[in-house]
Amino acid sequence: MDPHLLSTFVTVVAEGSFSAAADRLGYTQPAVSQQIAALEADLGVPLLTRRPVRPTRAGERLLEHAGPLLLRLRAARADVARLSAQPRALTVAAGPLALTADTAAALAGVTTLRIAGAATAVALVASGEADLALADGPAAPSDPLNLPDTGPLTTVGVREEELVVVLPEGHPLAGRPGLRLDDLADALWVDAPEVMPLDRLRAVARLDGLRPGIRYEGHDPAVAARLAAAGHGLTLLPASAAPCGVRVPLVAPRIVHRVELVHAALPPGPAAEVVRALTS
Amino acid sequence: MDPHLLSTFVTVVAEGSFSAAADRLGYTQPAVSQQIAALEADLGVPLLTRRPVRPTRAGERLLEHAGPLLLRLRAARADVARLSAQPRALTVAAGPLALTADTAAALAGVTTLRIAGAATAVALVASGEADLALADGPAAPSDPLNLPDTGPLTTVGVREEELVVVLPEGHPLAGRPGLRLDDLADALWVDAPEVMPLDRLRAVARLDGLRPGIRYEGHDPAVAARLAAAGHGLTLLPASAAPCGVRVPLVAPRIVHRVELVHAALPPGPAAEVVRALTS
DNA sequence: TCATATTACGTCGTCCGTAACGATT
DNA sequence: AATCGTTACGGACGACGTAATATGA
């Protein structure tokens, strides 16, 4: 199973077309056709239906592996390259809820700041495109975030903060001193996958439900809070990130908003300084 | 980075010689030489010192990635193959401390039982060589074991059991009702990596120390207990696995012996039956 | 001097591109 | 008929084996 073939396979599925994938990868279309045929011959199973081009069940299985596999490959290369690399621009990948005032203050010497979901931020560090990741997400108190395993990276907890449910004024539950998530499972929630993905919440809270309401595809927690305040659905945010709406502490299940710092082994330098500042 | 090259690299390091690796892989020796040269050219860094053949620092980094990478590759292949595979012999990989009487009773229809450490057991399932893994190891109560990430496998907790320190009769601490691990960190411990690896204990207990004493390379917990009872060092075992010696409950840190069942998506059949029996 | 890694070179296989073909809408 | 994937074929590159060479212990 050549990673090269795996990568074209992923592209073909993403594009939904052999010719489009060929264009994107800089091959001719027959080359892609042959690559897919080679992969199918190697595994002994059809991976794609043609017209329309869709993964078969076997193809879907392979896709689940292909992403992490290719990431790890890039991670290995990056990890080796880091040893001989010269210090350069300092890039930090941060989750949308990671940048409180304190955290921002600790980022001295940072050249580029990139906002990305937890998994993506870790992937950026693993593949060498970023030096530090500040991944954030919900977790049980003092439990680690469930980050993808991309090899030997150092992970340290930076912060845990209470979560609040954001409700519109006049909501029937707005007067309560605290709320239980299972009482809200049937309510409509703001579906903001880049701020606080509902599926992670479900996983951490061991809960089904959380019906998705309006979808917000941006990064800004304030927008999610405003949507909630305007009655488009509930949302759950760390207390400091919810500037408006009625904020009621979450009391059960016991979930906090956790921020973790992820980085590879760092030589002394500005990156290491930022790590020190963040973890002190 | 061709996985093929990666795999020869791993073999060369393991054998400590180009020619021995060539023999093992069925290549000629110059072929191996060229493969390593190609890998080094690709990464732009020397990976091995020659005479003696040892990994450089870059090589060591690469090695850390190569194992998981090749495992995941096998896992992907196995996962795809499982879809079209016919039901066959049912193989279970179990940790050395996983097979209590109850657990053994649940293994109806199992053809082969293989004893292996937690990481190996999971690797066997991922690569399709086993259908079920019963991984065991120390963990904080209700915390998951820290198993390697090899793709979409289902993990369920099966059991948690109290851990006891096994001491020889007449040991100064033998009369205590309970023991703290940090009080024993400077003592000599039975080093039984295939029963209860000391490094895992250190990691879970967040503790240095645990000086290794006599080394036992087998699987049998009873032997570890006997060595401890005979005064060759202390050991920590689940209460049910320590047939002799003075057994004192561990009271701090709060660590239990946890068993987890790991398996891929299973079609209905004997394997699924065993899963049901184990998790009911 | 012997063992062991590297270099040189010929051969074979693999992979891609061009061109022709086939199938599906 | 048009679009898109497959098959056919030729050329280029890469990979392995044999043979010769270099380098340490």
Image (spheres, coloured by chain):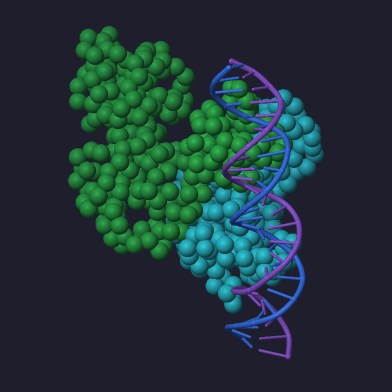
Chain colours: A cyan, B green, C blue, D purple
Judge by depth and name the residue closer to the eye, C21 or A164. Answer: C21
Asked if residue B91 lies left or right of residue B201, the reply is left
Q: Residue at x 50, y 67 (%)?
A: A46
Q: Residue at x 51, y 32 (%)?
A: B20
Residue A272 lies in what quarter of the image? Answer: top right
Residue A169 lies in what quarter of the image? Answer: bottom right
- Residue B86, compared with residue A255, is above or below; it is below
Judge by depth and name the residue closer to the eye, D16 or A211. Answer: D16
Asked if residue B252 lies left or right of residue B166, the reply is right
Image coords of residue A76 (percent x, y): 62, 40
Judge by depth and name the residue closer to the eye, C3 or A73. Answer: C3
Q: Residue at x 38, y 37 (%)?
A: B118
Judge by depth and name the residue closer to the eye, D10 or B158. Answer: D10
Image coords of residue A244 (percent x, y): 67, 53
Report if residue A257 is visible in the image. no
- The image quadrant where one finds the N terminus of chain B is top right
Q: Residue at x 72, y 36 (%)?
A: B44
